[in-house]
Image (tube, rainbow, N blue to C red):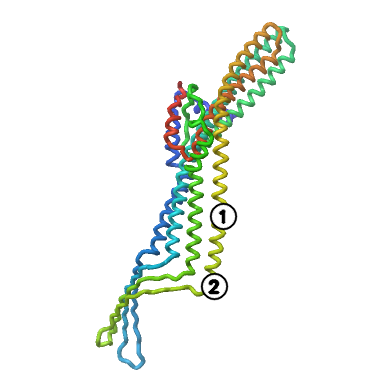
Amino acid sequence: MCRKTLLASALALLLSPGLQAASLLDVYQDAVQQDAELAVERSRLEQARAQISQANSFLLPQVTASGTWSQVDMDGATDTQENTNLTISAQQALFNAEAWFGRQAANQSFSAAEARFRDTEQNLLLRVAEAYFNVLRAEDNLRSSQAEEQAIKRQLDQAQEQYEVGLISITGVLEARAAHDGARAARIGAEGALMISYEDLEQITGQRYEQINLLNPELPVSAPVPNDRDAWVSMALDSSLTLQAARAGLLASQQNLRSRQARHLPTVALFGEYSKDSDRLNAAGGDNQTLVGVRGTLEIYGGGRTSAQIREGSAALDEARSSEELARRQVLQQTRSLFTQVNTDVLTVQARAQAIRSAESALEATRTGYEVGTRNIVDVLNAERTLWAARRDHDAARYNYVVNQLRLKRVAGTLSETDLRELNRWLVTAAN
């Protein structure tokens, strides 16, 4: 009993028209600050940025300083020998193919990370919209279930009254009661679904919302622009961030393999070194030495490490090629499917609206027939259910249309905050 009271209180709080409702933009702005997935990709982007600096460092001057101090006790000597050495050395790479290709690989890895971050930003726009409209879908389902339960309850009361005066048999009452029990169960399920949908929204934003704005019934439902599947496919192949990340990853793998293969090549560097030795027992006070020259190195044998790393890089390149091809196929399939789905959604919304009108007419006719004795209570209950199902299906079709349009733009790489702002204009407060 306590749990029922708490659930009813929470639902009353959520659906109360006196509360300040959050808009789609409000929810999105909260998500930008709190979403964990976006934070993860932002950190990965900064890691990739730092790796560019690390890769560049191998091609920039290297300067080091070192020093030693030692004391030697000589057998039979009356004094100790102290030695101090200070050395400063600098080196500048003249030829280092491994470092050069490594820098190119780091640049491409950063491009891939940047594309993934921008893709995550677009995905956040979509996830917020999906969660937001799932809440509205759940609210509509609950209102519809509540209204259906009340309508069937009236039919049950009417059937009970008619049974008591002998106008119908007990069968009509039992059928009405069964229908009412089913409607009540559906309403309870809708209450739970609404609470869960708000929890899903909170998971993205880290915020608890008491109420959100509703979708205006006057929202225009039209075909995507341009209404050309090939144009959307071309746009997706050019702008898809998922595909851009895969392509950059492929280029990074190519440069990384070249870097590993270049380890078989010599490296050449210009170097300079200045050292100062001081000896307390040396009358001259020590020696100073300056060296300037060119140093070349070539690995003769490293235990097979380089060859193994080349094989690993070759396998990684094969993986990147397959990943890029998989991403391309997925973008093509998703773009074509979503374009078709949005156009189907447009027709579905129109058909669902007509189904509501037809169900309303059918219910009115059935009620008239019931009053004159040509229809029974089961016919009325079925007509009631058909009407409420038609209304739920229409609401669902509108939400599907909105979300699928955003999904189409997201797979094409064109989804932006502007799209959410435009959609936000078609939201109205719950009090309306």
| Residue shown at the point (28%, 80%) measured from the top left | 288
176 w.r.t. 373: above or below: below
Q: Quadrant of residue 315?
A: bottom right
In depth, the one of 35 and 405 nearer the eye is 405
Question: Which one is closest to the eye, mark 1 or mark 2?
Answer: 1
- Whether tag 1 and tag 2 are in contact, CB under 8 A, the answer is no
**Circle 2: residue type:** Gly
Q: Quadrant of residue 86?
A: bottom left
- Please tell me which of labels 1 and 2 falls first in the chain: 2
Residue 32 locus on image (x, y percent): 43, 40
| Residue shown at the point (53%, 29%) measured from the top left | 401
| Residue shown at the point (52%, 72%) measured from the top left | 302
Residue 369 locus on image (x, y percent): 68, 9
374 w.r.t. 183: above or below: above
Q: Residues within 10 Å of mark 1 (few under 14, many from 20)?
A: some
The total of numbered circles placed on residues is 2
Q: Which residue is mark 1?
A: 319
The quadrant in which the C terminus is found is top left
158 w.r.t. 431: above or below: above
Residue 303's tag is 2
Q: Secondary structure at mark 2?
A: loop
Q: Is residue 180 in view?
A: yes
69 w.r.t. 171: above or below: below
Residue 85 locus on image (x, y percent): 32, 79
Q: Is residue 5 in view?
A: no
Query: In the shown orientation, is residue 152 left or right of residue 285?
Result: right
Q: Secondary structure at mark 1?
A: helix
